[in-house]
Amino acid sequence: MAIAVSLAPEPTIISPSVKVGVPPGLKLIDSDKLDLRSDEEIAAWLQRPHPITSEKNVWAFWHSGYTGMAPWVQRNIINWVRRLGPEWTVHLLDNLPHSETNVAHFVESSYFPDAFNNNTMDGPNVGPHSGDLVRLPLIWKYGGVWIDAGTFLFRSIDDICWKYIEDPTTPFEVAGFVIEMRPGVNCMLNGFIAAKRKNPFIKRWHDIYLALWEGGVDKLNCPNLNVVMEAFSDYMAAFMCFERLRKLVDPADGFNGPEYYSKHMLLFPALRETYYFQQQTNWSGNRQFELLTAKRVGEGVVKDENWQAAENFVTDALANTSTMKLSHGPPGALDSFLADLWDSKEHQEKDNVDGTFAAYLRYGSVHFEQTREMIPMKMGCPTEEVLNCGVLEPKEV
């Protein structure tokens, strides 16, 4: 259980819109490590392609481009750039015809199904499906970290995972967050994936997902959650492909998924590192909106029980969880989503109103660094039946 944190006795930094002290469990980031360009300058920079000079890339995708994003999502990406500074290059790609940042300039069409290449995908999940298709090829070809655009980043990528992936003395080659999909069965989410280029697990994972699109794999495990299974299978297909691969031993080339999963993956619990805020609010987007919309500083603010609840919620998130992933699905899973509220015209600026707890959360995500140690999960080999078959060989499970 997390320990609620409160403000330090004396303020140590003043912002025009957020008066803050440094809460316990956090420290200030030196300003020379930040990208100090204006929001407008970073936004313009994000809409241009950038050379790939190392594996320290952050990959994100929005099928309709930067201008098609809700304002709160735009601010997420801008804040990544500002926080990560010059050591990391953030690449925001799209699938817009004639766009300089179209993913086609980075990845060959052979990595994608015809529906993606021809822009004939339809239905409510075109954006998520497109993102699922592009993330693994980008990491495979260039290396780096994929982060879903709806994610707040509260910790440096180096401290989350990259220093371990780069260190040749550690066994770790892939990093991410895992969640229990079924009792006793953990699966890595694909909203945060880190690996160096040419990683064998990443390539096979994408091969399975592409084959699923092209009708080449007939049967996959499907976890059981409290949602309509047709919608779940559609929305979460990439996770099911991961589950197949981590159980698979390929007799053709000796690839051993269970062994790779247990030895070479640096995995952290998603319920702490990306969905912690959900647990603290009983998975209620309405409650999250209420807390973050509340005024933190300014005239007439009363530091009552509601104020303290919002203060604890934000400082706890900043100090004790590395990311905060907001999403719109899977459909029917929850009664309310904060992302949907912030998407609406009525509330599209509420994530950054001066003096609110939301503005404080954004400010802290850029200016604070955590002092806690992240504890990875110890992943044993999967206990379910091992699949002895080729990566794309149909297999009933």
Image (spheres, rainbow, N blue to C red):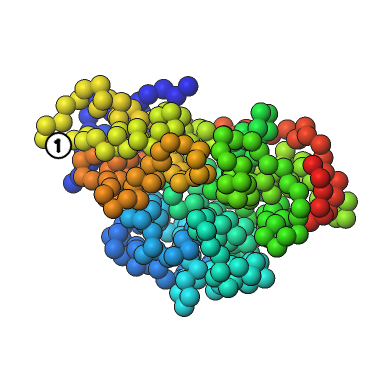
Q: Can residue 54 be seen at all in this image of the molecule?
A: no
Give the residue pinned by disc 1.
298
- Identified at 67% across, 60% down, the residue is 213
Residue 205, above or below 182: below
Residue 37, above or below 273: below
Classify residue 107 by image quadrant: bottom right
Q: Position of residue 298 (x, y in %)?
A: 14, 36
- Badge 1 amino acid: Gly
The C terminus: image quadrant: top right
Q: Position of residue 332 (x, y in %)?
A: 50, 40
Mark 1, other Cα within 10 Å: few <14 / some 14–19 / many ≥20? few
- Identified at 46% across, 78% down, the residue is 98
- Depth check, front residue: 344 or 365: 344
- Number of numbered markers: 1
Q: Can residue 331 be seen at all in this image of the molecule?
A: yes
Q: Residue furthest left?
A: 299
- Depth check, front residue: 51 or 33: 51
- Depth check, front residue: 29 or 284: 284
327 with respect to 168 (left or right): left
Classify residue 299 by image quadrant: top left
Q: Position of residue 12 (x, y in %)?
A: 24, 36
SS under mark 1: loop
- Identified at 21% across, 36% down, the residue is 295
Residue 204, above or below 295: below
- Identified at 56% across, 34% down, the residue is 226
